[in-house]
Amino acid sequence: MNTRLHYLTTFPGILDAYFNYSLPGKAVSKGLISYQTVNLRDYTQDAHRTTDDTPFGGGPGMVMKLDPIVQALQDCRQPNSLVILPTPKGTLLTQEVVHHISSYEHLIFICGHYEGVDDRVFQYVDMPLSIGDYVLGGGEISSIVITDAVIRFVKGVLGNQESTQIESFEDKQRLEHPNFTRPATYNEMGIPDVLLSGHHQKIEEWRKLESLRWTLLLKPELIQPDSLSKNDLQRLRTIKASLNRTIDSLLNNYE
């Protein structure tokens, strides 16, 4: 299946640069995905090809006009399209949302700029999406973030598709375990001995323990009681005992 991507933008060069490197570039060259930038200036009616105007009611900045976007959508939208608008008003992008988006064969991104887009644009959007609680200069970067997460699930894009199944947020919504590669020692920093043991069962258990440990320390909100197996409960006891020993050792230095 070829995943088709359209970007409605006033800065097509940003998208072209992204698709010229690494995985996206290889995916395009293999025909696994295809992309097209649609310059919104081509859908304007004035000599200056203006895509923005001052906001009603006054205020700083400019607002992107609605008509060029609607006209561009009419040209590229199809029955199986999913129209995405990166916006702070959108649903937060999560791995679950990425899975949903990746099931579509045709994605259309509306790339806003300036103070945003005429709010009536939401009447033409299927999925408003937010990549976080911060502001960027334009929707192109947000669209690239969403694209980069989605195309990894297109069959053939990754050399080993199993990579998508063992990373952060995939296994029970937990962070991935730490990873290391050669050399085993660098500037006197080593790696856990178990990874050099060749004992696959012990390595797998270490990875599950560390995944749970780092999720507990950094994103405890991801751990839901109903997601904990009996083995997970034993791992939690192991983590608790380890932390208690560390805390006791630190406190002993001050007694």
Image (cartoon, rainbow, N blue to C red):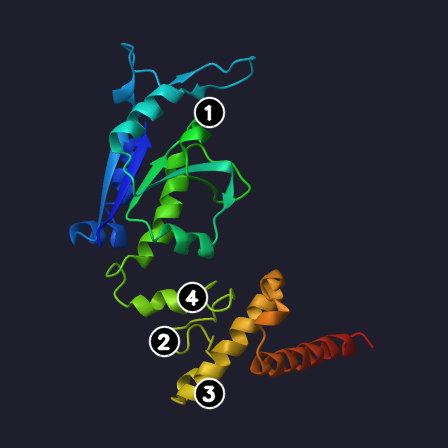
Quarter of the figure with residue 51:
top left
Separation of residues labelled 3 and 1 (CA atoms): 57 Å
Give me the residue at 37% from left, 73% from top. Answer: 181
Residue placed furthest toward the left: 30
Location of the C terminus by quadrant is bottom right
Separation of residues labelled 2 and 1 (CA atoms): 56 Å
Location of the N terminus by quadrant is bottom left
Separation of residues labelled 4 and 2 (CA atoms): 22 Å
Three-letter code for the amino acid on which mark 4 is drawn: Glu
Q: Which of marks 2 and 3 is in front?
A: 3
Q: Indicate which disc residue 167 carries.
A: 4
Q: Name the residue under label 2.
A: 183
Q: What element carries label 3?
A: helix
| Residue 199: x %, y % from top left | 41, 90
Considering only order in the chain, which callout, 2 or 4, is on the residue closer to the N terminus?
4
Q: Indicate which disc residue 202 carries.
A: 3
Three-letter code for the amino acid on which mark 1 is drawn: Arg
Separation of residues labelled 2 and 3 (CA atoms): 21 Å
| Residue 208: x %, y % from top left | 50, 77
Q: Does the rendering let one see residue 39?
A: no
Three-letter code for the amino acid on which mark 3 is drawn: Lys
Classed neighbour count for the residue bearing mark 2: other residues with Cα under 10 Å, few (<14), some (14–19), many (≥20): few
Q: Which of marks 2 and 1 is in front?
A: 1
Give me the residue at 41% from left, 77% from top. Answer: 185
